[in-house]
Amino acid sequence: MPLEDVFGRILGLKEPWFVEDVVFDTGKLEVDIYVGFRAGAQLPCPECGGLCPVHDTVKRTWRHLNFFQYPAYIHAKMPRVVCGKHGTRTVKVPWSRRLPDSASLCKEGQGKHQGRLREGTRP
Ligand SMILES: [Zn+2]
C-alpha cells in the first residue's frame, strides 16, 4: 500500500479526500501531510449536509498528534462551498473533528494489537 494511502487510512479520509503527499522534514524534524480533494468533487454544506460545488479554497495548516516523537502537520486547501440555502460556507474537514481522549485511543489500540500479536505468535 502506498504511503499516502496508509496516512489516508490513519486520518480516516474518505472520497473525495485523499493524501497527496507525506514529507518528513529532516531540518525541522516534523512530518508534513498534504491533503487534497478530487477535482470537481461536490462537498457537503456544513449547515444542511447537501452536496454543493466548491467556490474557492484557502490554504490552512493544522497541528495533529505526533507521529512517534515528531510533530505532525496537515496542510490542505480548505474549500468553501456555495449552498443554495446557506450561501458560501467553509466545509468541515474530516481531520478537524474532536479527537478521542488518549485513554480511549490506548484501549482501542491495545485490543487491535493484542489480536494481531496473537495471530503472529510463533510456537
Ligand atoms: Zn446548506
Image (cartoon, rainbow, N blue to C red):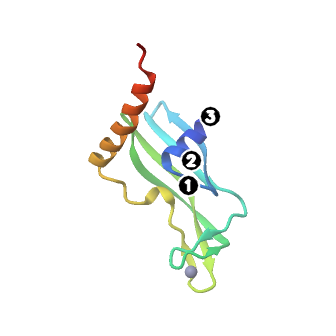
The amino acid beneath tag 1 is Ala
The spot of residue 25 in percent (x, y) is 50, 34
Which residue is painted at 69% across and 64% down in the image?
Answer: 41
Q: Residue at x 58, y 35 (%)?
A: 3
Looking at the image, the residue that sits furthest to the bottom is: 85
Q: How would you rate the neighbour count of disc 1 (Cα within 10 Å): few for under 14, some for 14-19, many for 20 or more? A: many
- Check contact, mark 3 vs mark 2: CB within 8 A: no
Looking at the image, do the residues carrying marks 2 and 1 touch, with CB atoms under 8 Å apart? yes
Residue at image mark 3:
1
Between marks 3 and 1 in the image, the one whose residue lies nearer the viewer: 3
Disc 2 is placed on an element classified as strand
First-in-chain label (3 vs 1): 3
Disc 3 element: loop
Q: Quadrant of ligand 1?
A: bottom right
Above or below for 115 versus 66: above
Residue 74, placed above or below residue 50: above
Extreme-right residue of the structure: 40
Comparing 49 with 92, the one in front is 49
Name the N-terminal-most of marks 2 and 1: 2
Amino acid at circle 2:
Tyr
Q: What element carries label 1?
A: strand
Task: Name above or below for residue 16 compared with residue 54.
Answer: above
Q: Which residue is drawn at 73% across and 64% down?
A: 40
What residue is shown with label 1?
A: 76
Residue, disc 2: 34
Q: Which x, y percent locates residue 102?
A: 29, 47
Q: What residue type is labelled 3?
A: Met
Disc 3 to disc 1, C-alpha distance: 22 Å
Label 2, label 1: how far apart the Cα atoms are? 6 Å
Frontmost of labels 3 and 2 is 3
| Residue that appears at 53% across and 45% down | 9
Q: Quadrant of residue 45?
A: bottom right
